[in-house]
Amino acid sequence: MKSYVPNTEKERLEMLAEIGMSSMDDLFTDIPADLKLDRKLDLPDPMSESELRDLIRGFVYLNEEGGPLFRGAGAYRHYTPSVVPQLAMRSEFYTAYTPYQAEMSQGMLQSLFEYQTVICRLTGLDAANASVYDGATAAAESMLMLRDNKRKKKILYAESLNPDVITVMHTYAHCAGLELFKIPMTDKGTADIAAIEANMEGAAGYIGATPNYFGNIEPMDKIAEAVHAKGGLLVAYVNPITLGVLKRPADYGADIAIGDGQPLGLPLAFGGPYVGFMAATKKLMRNLPGRIAGETRDAEGNRVFVLTLQAREQHIRREMAASNICSNQMLCAIMASMYCCVMGPKGMREVGEQNVAKAHLLAKKLCEIEGVKLRFPETPFFNEFVIDVPCADDINKALMNYSITGGLVLPDGGMLWCATEMNSVDEFDFVCDIIQDTVDSMGGEE
Amino acid sequence: MRSEYKLIFERSHEGRRAYDLPKCDAPDAMNEIPECFRAESELALPELGEVDLVRHFTNLSRRNFGVDNGFYPLGSCTMKYNPKINEELAPMFDDVHPLLEPEMAQGCLALMADMEHMLCEICGMDAFTLQPAAGAHGELTGLMHIRAYHEHRGDFERKVMIVPDAAHGTNPASAAMAGFKVKEIKSAPDGGVDLDALRAAVGPDTAGLMLTNPSTLGLFERNIKEIAKIVHEAGGLLYYDGANLNAIMGIVRPGDMGFDVMHINLHKTFSTPHGGGGPGSGPVGVKSHLIPFMPVPRIEQKDDMLVLNYDKPDSIGKIKSFYGNFGVIAKAYCYIRSLGGEGLKEASENAVLNANYVMNKLRGIYDIPHDRTCMHECVVTPTEEMMKNEIHTSDIAKALIDRGYHPPTIYFPLIVHEAMMIEPTETESRETLDEFVEAMRGIAEQVKTDAAAIHAAPVTTPVGRPDEVTAARKPIVKYEEE
């Protein structure tokens, strides 16, 4: 049996004797006897390392994945340079905690300062925090920033946001007493700007995504105009891997940029851990939640990094804090930062171009199949798009027989497809053949 | 010794590259995107060769201190050893997309369902959700259950969450975010909940009480049964902050103490690495009367398959995308399966033994404001004589850094003036504890002979004490080229 306790039985008894006790039970006399557990915990027997490895392999075999993947919808398969996980496995990073003691935590603090700089450069904004849990909670936290900054409880949001993001926003909004107002999507698959103009009065701001959940690139400059005309703030929810080729939030006047950093070198890992990023204009910097690393000097004048602007935080302000967030996703944040530094300006552009190229070729090939149509043919997209097909569930079942994960089936029967630099043209042709067969056989049955 | 370290942006040389993408076998399609949506410039990111990038981060890591570097008795954070095998096994799930059809993700779902059951047994609760991403996130989620419970009964008057003044800062912050008014109650002289203050505080507006047990002083709340009775009789619910669960596994369970809802920090008690400040994981456990309010989706057995059920009309909703920090959950799962029930109990017993061993040896060198058998951590303070020499807790912390230790948590709990909260954890050997105590003794001696040297500490680190006031007054939060 293993509990990672180094002290031997003999040493433990000696230590007990030194504090005047004879058994472990003596340590727990403050606990009322009738509350104590009078039996052993009913858990499986302990395991050796090799037994544990077999057990986990068993779970892995129960999953049926590993083939080509055409699904995104908030979690994306991209190439991860091997240096990213290798460097994140430096145990000086991953076995540390929040860098409260700056002198012995410069590695993490400087890495966070670099991460914040990377996020500022991706978004074009002035300040970023050291991360929140994920994109959805970043959206929820951004509602609280809007409320605190504008002292208003009404917040507009786009129907075209990821449904998980919308659900999380509603969960938080109920508790914060916020009034969330939905801006519908037009038949072009982007936000109804007239509805923003008509409902902005009295609202603190608007939260919308580009590309949105359906893959469509939104006219953010026009949205920004509509939001700002009534004194509101614009929150742009962006996929960071698009920012090498698409306009950055500051370019169209976003006041806050948020999103999920998972596409930047983080594994899919069945939904987490990912990393939520948040950036804002200088004016909104003190409304940001959570940790922020800052630069200062020591007595000798050396550049030093510290956690700063802590007066916003729970350990100082308690119930008056901007947020309750304490632990966030720092290791994931520095992985995203490492990814961007590996890619550099050219790599970020190239990966963006590759995604655009692959997704457009896939869309073209799919639409050559009779009965398959792009739902929003006039609207530009990045690496995801919606098609209408006669038989979405059957298509995915047929693909599953070849260990291929097709596009996500939407509640209305449409399919949300995603292609990244990880998909090949050979895969596209194979997938299209299977879909063609499926559509044909459907026709035969009718 | 002192040295600045270049930022990665200061190491950039135009044209260098470390990236390597697959060849693109599809024709360029950028012209499909109208120019008005396209970026006007390249991103201002650094350009480095791979070896320079690797050295940059490797050497940055050497300017950091983790559990693998040395003793890290940061109170309330449970900085125990993070087993290597778990780091090796969890990435086996890295390629699983969260939105696969359930039949393709049975392994992940089975692991999560199994984890929920094991946490129920360890804590004496009826159901667990693994969705919250950290301890504070778990607190918020748990408090949302309490709010939903009262609202569901049509009782909208219960707006007050009672929080002892010894509580973690996240407690009142989470209560405020859940929409409660926070009523703080003073602790009794022994550091526990003041029963009279609690009786005076409860009423028809009481939604609940948040409690850490063992308390932030590292002491078991002996009156827990009476506390539960007072809160329940007033119609409130009892919230358990699981930050200190490492003291009691297999010995006593929050569910048996009368708690209705709780969170666990998997990154503390269940050995997953703290990641320099996350990712963590903060599962929430509830008693049966709160099950209808749990976040969706719930993992359920349907015929011979595990499925995700979103159809829960009374649920608080979702508090995070997908299902939680799965990668962290998988590591904690490995830990529990490695140890088994007896191993968990052994861990708790030794955590408590180590804390008492350290406290006993520090007695007479430092003051111990609440001197009785402690649980997994103890709180000590500088002596009056040290304070007369202008040596404060922060000075002792900096002096410990020079002696190769991560300092304890300092200035917390707030109810103890100049607190140092020491949590050794069970994974430290006797000689590590002895050496730490000798270092603490050495500092106490040096106060008498050379207080100035302690004020100058740390001197062995790459940088000296930072000017935090200027950092906050004139914030520089990103790099800008000159």
Image (tube, coloured by chain):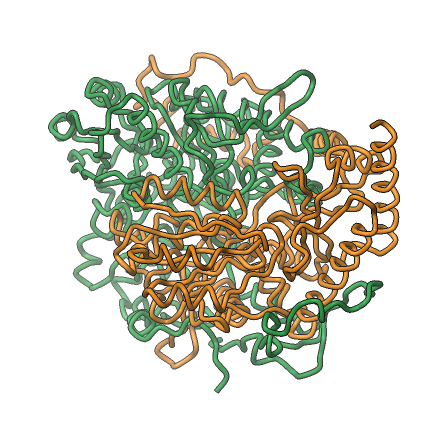
Chain colours: A orange, B green
Location of residue B5 in the rendering, given as x and y in whole percent from the top left corner = 52, 76
Rendered residue at 88%/47% (across/down): A430
Rendered residue at 28%/48% (across/down): B412
Residue nearest the viewer, comparing B362 with A341: A341
* Residue B337 drawn above or below residue A211: above
Q: Quadrant of residue B339?
A: top right
Location of residue B451 in the rendering, given as x and y in whole percent from the top left corner = 27, 67
Location of residue A325 in the rendering, given as x and y in whole percent from the top left corner = 39, 49
Rendered residue at 71%/63% (across/down): A356
Residue nearest the viewer, comparing B428 with B38: B38
Rendered residue at 41%/32% (across/down): B316
The number of discs equals 0
> Does the rendering let one see residue A168?
yes
> Does the rendering let one see residue B379?
no
* Residue B57 drawn above or below residue A173: below
* Residue B119 drawn above or below residue A142: above
Q: Residue furthest front?
A: A446
Residue nearest the viewer, comparing B342 with A386: A386
* Residue A215 drawn above or below residue B36: above
Location of residue B22 in the rendering, given as x and y in whole percent from the top left corner = 80, 63
Image side of residue A322 versus residue B91, left or right = left
Image side of residue A243 versus residue A225, left or right = right
